[in-house]
Each structure stands twice: as C-alpha cells, then as structure tokens.
Image (cartoon, grey):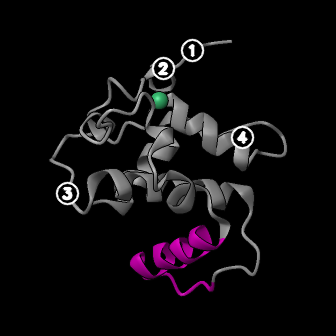
Amino acid sequence: MMTNPWENVCCNGSDLTIGNLDDMECITEHPAFERVVLDRTVLEVAFIQILMYKRSRARAPDELSNTQYRLAAYRQFVSLMMKGEKLGKGNRVVIPSCVTQKIRSEFPSSDNTYCGFKSILDSMNELFQ
Ligand SMILES: [Zn+2]
C-alpha cells in the first residue's frame, strides 16, 4: 500500500497538536477527545453548524452517514486544538495519523475507502477560512 505523508504525521510532530499535548503521550488521550470528537450527539450538532456556517439551506439529515460523522469529527478536532485561532495564510491543517485512525475506527467507511488527503484538506480549509 502506498503511504501518504499526511498519514504519517505524529501528534508529537504536528503544529496543530504539539502545543496541546502537555504531558500526554498521544493527543487521543486528551481529556476532551472522546466527548468532543467521538460523541455522536456532539457531532450531529456540529454538523448542523457546518451547514449553517456554509449557509447551506440543506437540512441536516436525521441520521448522519459515517462520512458526515468523520467530517464533523475532523472539524471538531481542529476546533479543539486551535481554540478559535485562525489559520495563517498558507498554513495547512495536518491531522495526525493517530487521530484519523481513531476517527476511522469509530466511523468506518462501508467500502473501506476514505476521502484522500486533498479532499479532506479542501473541506477543512474551506471551513476554517
Ligand atoms: Zn498520537
């Protein structure tokens, strides 16, 4: 399998997470991680906010697909890490592999394909502009 550099970023080596690690070994041990990033109700609310932010007229579906859960989870994670800071121009959101793996195992894709590097980044960057 091809390895993608994005997939191999460690939470100890990502600007997004390094300042939030304190004395944790992995950012997935963050005390708010499960509540903010993996809780379904929280993600459903976050998804509605994504739609509102994008001024979409679409109504949130009654049940989210796992793809939608994952998108909301990535966004929640970035919000938790950045605490409202804006991304500098040219800075990219890099989500460490431990976090992607955790989110994917919670919300697996039915056919085991995942949005690649670029499409996730595009949707993330769009949300954080
Ligand atoms: Zn980690």
Kindly identify the residue that appears in the image at 51 percent across and 25 percent down: 7
In the rendered view, would you say 12 is above or below 113? above
Residue assigned mark 2: 8
Question: What is the residue that sits farthest to the front in this orientation?
Answer: 23
Give the alpha-carbon distance from disc 3 to disc 1, as whole Å: 29 Å
Mark 1 sits on what residue? 3
Q: Residues within 10 Å of mark 1 (few under 14, many from 20)?
A: few
- Distance between mark 2 and mark 3 Cα atoms: 24 Å
Task: Write down the quadrant of residue 59 in the picture.
Answer: bottom right
Kindly state the secondary structure of the residue where label 1 is placed. Answer: loop
Q: Do the numbered discs 1 and 2 sit on residues whose CB atoms are within 8 Å?
A: yes
Mark 4 vs 1, N-terminal side: 1
Counting residues from the start of the chain, the first of labels 4 and 2 encountered is 2
Q: Which residues are magenta?
A: 41-59
Spatial CA distance of label 1 from label 2 is: 8 Å
Amino acid, disc 3: Lys
